[in-house]
C-alpha cells in the first residue's frame, strides 16, 4: 500500500497545483504519468484498452470508500 500512497500523493499534488497555475509541458507529462500509474494500480493486472477504464472506476470507488484518507492526502498536497 505504500507505493499506492506515494502515487496518490504525487497525483493529488499535481491536481492541487493545476488549480492555481497552468502546468508546463514537462509538468503536464509528469502528472499524466502519475494519473496513468494510479489507474494501472487499480486495474490490478488487467490489460488492454479496458484496463484504464476499469482502473479509473476502481480508483473512484476506492476514493469514496476512503474519503478521510483522500482528504488527508489532498490536504497535505496543499501545504
Image (cartoon, helix red, strand yellow):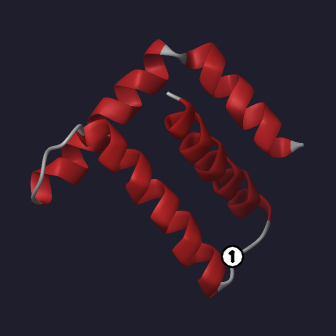
> Vertically, is 40 above or below 33?
above
The residue drawn where x is 39% and y is 32% is: 60
Q: Residue furthest bottom?
A: 25
Indicate the quadrant where residue 20 lies.
bottom right
What x and y, as percent, mark residue 17?
75, 59
Classed neighbour count for the residue bearing mark 1: other residues with Cα under 10 Å, few (<14), some (14–19), many (≥20): some
What x and y, as percent, mark residue 47?
12, 53
Indicate the quadrant where residue 57 lies.
top left
> Toward the viewer: 22 or 26?
26
> Toward the viewer: 23 or 76?
76
What x and y, as percent, mark residue 4?
50, 37
The residue drawn where x is 61% and y is 42% is: 6
Q: Which residue is mark 1?
A: 23
Under circle 1, the secondary element is loop
Number of numbered labels in the structure image: 1
The residue drawn where x is 73% and y is 24% is: 72
Residue 55 is left or right of residue 47, and the answer is: right
Quadrant where the C terminus is found in the figure: top right
> Vertically, is 64 above or below 51?
above
Q: Residue furthest right?
A: 79
Residue 47 is left or right of residue 77, and the answer is: left
What x and y, as percent, mark residue 27?
65, 75
The residue drawn where x is 78% and y is 70% is: 21
> Vertically, is 28 above or below 6?
below
Amino acid at each position: 500500500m505504500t507505493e499506492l500512497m506515494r502515487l496518490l500523493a504525487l497525483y493529488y499534488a499535481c491536481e492541487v497545483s493545476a488549480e492555481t497555475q497552468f502546468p508546463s509541458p514537462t509538468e503536464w507529462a509528469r502528472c499524466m504519468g502519475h494519473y496513468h500509474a494510479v489507474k494501472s494500480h487499480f486495474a490490478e493486472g488487467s490489460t488492454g484498452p479496458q484496463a484504464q477504464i476499469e482502473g479509473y472506476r476502481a480508483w473512484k470507488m476506492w476514493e469514496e470508500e476512503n474519503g478521510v484518507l483522500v482528504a488527508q492526502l489532498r490536504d497535505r498536497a496543499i501545504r
